[in-house]
């Protein structure tokens, strides 16, 4: 971020990176040691950082609010105050009773009320307003997590050119689950207001892309989607920790003291450590039961191993959490009651939070870390445990459902629902040879050290700035009023004009059934008026077949190229521009028909010089799979037969390689043409743009990388522009 002087990095998260408490009627502010706060604190930037968020509790007294605002302003922090109703309906309601269970695959726990959603929209609007109050052009906005998924879209409406990042810290669920959410479209549209959307893992990103495909019917190209005139990038950014803080923890005097105290307390028994917040997604009950089975099946380990179970209180007033705690308490009681001895208790259970010093000491002495969430976005506890092991050994047992399992392959990876697997993993961890322990730990530490929280935040910001720069580059191609005025002026002065127009996606919109994309009266009137000017030669450059084009446009005073330039309609006659060869179709047809039969909703269109597989009406996921299969099947025969494979808008076309719009357009240019205009929307039109002389005005329909000089958003913009040409005298 070297060019961000005097600009701001505006961070928005539901919770602020500090806690506010009251002691003797005085406010106290304690900074958070959480991963997000640490990562953003360590981010190297010359921009001014401003953090916006909720203080974490209701503050109803205006005088106290004023005091909090005043104190936090000194730290560049801006609070968003929520009412008790908003806390209940937005935070405890839609965020944690609707989104949280669904995104963690606990649909059965999802509770939905319309008022929750209304409050969610309202609070997201509050955050948007706070961000807008400090935003200036050129600032960077970084929004965090599932509580604020509408904010990017709200900001985009206010600031179309803003650089907006969003990071999701929890899993994004599969399409099959996400589609159940009544407001699924609104949430996706909110997220798509971002310039860059970040996820912890490939799976989460893939699920998001799949949902956008299927719910909004929008296409991603690799990691990019064009949505409402701006690029949206998606990326994978596995979050890390402050590695050095944990690695060097055992050197601190206070932590060394705790280490000795814990060693004395637990004696020579092997320590298995479990640390979690109370939540049904953490799998706490499963691992406690698995530990009980371990003691049952392997009695030799009794009195030799202790499970230290730390459960941080969470949402204690919620019935599901109360019920979960009762089950955990009961199960622990049963195990301790059954296996305890006078000098040994199997499970040491702490229902409270531990501070950093105590936790680091336990990490250091623990022989095994048992971290088996049923679903977790990342799980930084696993990384903290690994990092703390300076001059010590330990084994990490990690759930495959934790995002961190993608990186931490040298852990013992288990299915958290399989109690037998967890039980056996405990035994294997305790019996693992020292050399293997050290080798695994060394590999884990290398990964955790390199993928630290500073790298996470820096990588995200750098990718965000890169995406912003690409966006700005494309924006410079947008056909503005000033650029349009210059084109109109050149058009007006010209004596000989050549106007080349694509049809589908340029003059008319796409139709799910190609045969239904007939021109409306506005298009016919437009072409009639353009052709009425004696200085104009109007040419339709289409990939469509001769029959449709002749039926739709044959009576208009225009030339028509069909099938990408293979046939020319002129003086009411079709002329073949290239020698026809149909023998290749005998080999390609069966291949394409094979894919058609495997893909419901798709069909094959046969033209004189090409074959086209259409899949606009097919399931998107299946169509993408079949497209790759078809491409693989076509590569060798098309290479041998000198055929070209072209990807279009929801279609794949095989045609003769020497037939394209570029070659066709080159033959239309006259020496005295002092104005050439070409407009198109896909790859076939890029051929045309590249063949035209430098002075030609080339316009791409649709946002994306192009050889064209200018961009417009849709065929509606094309029509408006062409009507301006017709009315040039009145416009200039």
Image (cartoon, rainbow, N blue to C red):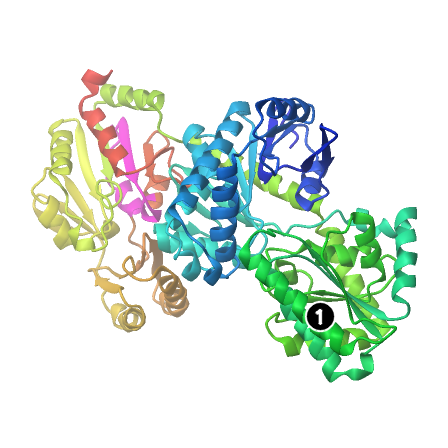
- Residue 19 seen anywhere in this rendered image of the structure: yes
Quadrant where the N terminus is found in the figure:
top right
Q: Dot 1 corresponds to which residue?
A: 333
Residue 683, position as x, y percentages in the image: 35, 48
Q: Is residue 716 above or below residue 664?
A: above
Image point (25%, 29%), residue name = 721
Question: Is 676 a magenta residue?
Answer: yes
Residue 47, position as x, y percentages in the image: 65, 28
9 left or right of 716?
Answer: right
Image point (85%, 50%), residue name = 249
> Which stretch is magenta?
661-685
Helix, strand or loop under label 1: helix
Question: Is 627 a magenta residue?
Answer: no
575 and 109: which is toward the camera? 109
1 left or right of 680?
Answer: right
Q: Is residue 337 above or below residue 113?
A: below
515 and 144: which is toward the camera? 144
Residue 487, position as x, y percentages in the image: 30, 24
712 left or right of 426?
Answer: left
Residue 27, position as x, y percentages in the image: 71, 29
Image point (84%, 55%), residue name = 361
40 and 147: which is toward the camera? 147
């Amino acid at each position: 971020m070297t060019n961000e002087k005097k600009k701001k990095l505006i961070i928005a998260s539901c919770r602020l990176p500090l806690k506010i408490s009251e002691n003797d009627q005085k406010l106290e502010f304690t900074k958070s040691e959480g991963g997000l706060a640490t990562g953003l604190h360590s981010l190297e930037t010359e921009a001014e950082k401003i953090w916006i968020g909720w203080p974490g509790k209701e503050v109803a007294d205006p005088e106290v609010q004023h005091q909090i605002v005043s104190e936090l302003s000194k730290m560049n922090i801006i609070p968003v105050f929520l009412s008790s109703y908003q806390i209940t309906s937005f935070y405890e309601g839609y965020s944690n009773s609707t989104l949280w269970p669904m995104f963690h695959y606990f649909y059965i726990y999802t509770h939905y009320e319309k008022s929750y959603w209304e409050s969610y929209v309202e609070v997201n609007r509050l955050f948007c307003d706070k961000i807008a109050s400090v935003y200036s052009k050129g600032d960077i906005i970084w929004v965090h997590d599932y509580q604020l998924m509408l904010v990017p879209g709200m900001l985009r409406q206010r600031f179309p050119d803003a650089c907006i990042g969003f990071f999701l810290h929890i899993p994004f669920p599969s399409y099959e689950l996400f589609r159940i959410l009544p407001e699924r479209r609104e949430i996706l549209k909110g997220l798509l207001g971002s310039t860059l959307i970040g996820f912890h893992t490939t799976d989460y990103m893939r699920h998001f892309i799949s949902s956008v495909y299927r719910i909004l019917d929008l296409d991603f190209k690799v990691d990019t989607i064009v949505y409402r005139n701006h690029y949206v990038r998606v990326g994978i950014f596995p979050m890390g920790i402050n590695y050095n803080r944990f690695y060097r923890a055992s050197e601190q005097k206070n932590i060394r003291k705790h280490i000795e105290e814990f060693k004395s307390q637990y004696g020579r028994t092997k320590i298995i450590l479990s640390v979690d917040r109370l939540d049904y997604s953490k799998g706490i009950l499963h691992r406690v039961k698995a530990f009980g089975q371990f003691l049952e099946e392997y009695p030799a380990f009794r009195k030799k191993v202790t499970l230290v179970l730390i459960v941080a209180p969470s949402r204690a007033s919620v019935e599901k959490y109360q019920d979960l705690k009762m089950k955990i308490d009961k199960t622990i009681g049963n195990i301790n009651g059954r296996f305890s001895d006078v000098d040994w208790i199997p499970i040491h259970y702490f229902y409270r939070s531990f501070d950093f010093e105590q936790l680091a000491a336990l990490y250091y002495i623990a022989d095994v870390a048992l971290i088996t969430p049923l679903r977790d976005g990342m799980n930084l506890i696993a990384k903290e445990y690994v990092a703390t092991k300076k001059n010590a050994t330990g084994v990490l047992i990690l759930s495959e459902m934790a995002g961190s399992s993608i990186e931490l392959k040298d852990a013992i990876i288990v299915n958290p629902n399989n109690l037998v697997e967890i039980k056996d993993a405990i035994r294997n961890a305790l019996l693992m040879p020292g050399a293997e322990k050290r080798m695994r730990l060394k590999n884990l530490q290398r990964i955790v050290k390199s993928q630290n929280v500073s790298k996470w935040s820096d990588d995200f910001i750098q990718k965000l700035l890169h995406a912003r720069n690409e966006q700005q580059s494309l924006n410079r191609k947008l056909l503005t009023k000033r650029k349009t005025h210059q084109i109109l002026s050149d058009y007006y002065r010209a004596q000989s004009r050549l106007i080349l127009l694509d049809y589908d996606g340029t003059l008319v919109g796409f139709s799910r059934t190609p045969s239904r994309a007939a021109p409306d009266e506005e298009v016919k009137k437009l072409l009639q008026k353009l052709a009425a000017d004696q200085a104009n030669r109007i040419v339709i450059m289409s990939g469509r077949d001769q029959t449709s084009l002749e039926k739709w446009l044959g009576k208009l005073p225009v030339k028509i190229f069909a099938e990408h330039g293979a046939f020319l309609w002129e003086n009411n006659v079709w002329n073949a521009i290239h020698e026809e060869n149909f023998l290749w179709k005998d080999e390609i047809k069966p291949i394409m028909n094979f894919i058609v039969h495997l893909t419901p909703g798709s069909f094959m269109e046969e033209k004189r010089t090409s074959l086209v597989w259409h899949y606009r009406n097919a399931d998107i996921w299946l169509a993408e799979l079949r497209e790759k299969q078809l491409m693989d099947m076509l590569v060798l025969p098309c290479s041998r037969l000198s055929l070209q494979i072209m990807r279009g808008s929801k279609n794949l076309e095989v045609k003769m390689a020497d037939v394209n719009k570029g070659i066709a357009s080159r033959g239309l240019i006259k020496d005295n043409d002092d104005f050439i205009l070409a407009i198109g929307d896909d790859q076939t039109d890029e051929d045309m743009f590249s063949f035209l002389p430098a002075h030609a005005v080339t316009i791409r329909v649709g946002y994306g990388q192009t050889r064209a000089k200018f961009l417009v958003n849709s065929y509606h913009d094309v029509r408006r522009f062409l009507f301006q040409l017709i009315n040039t005298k009145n416009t200039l």
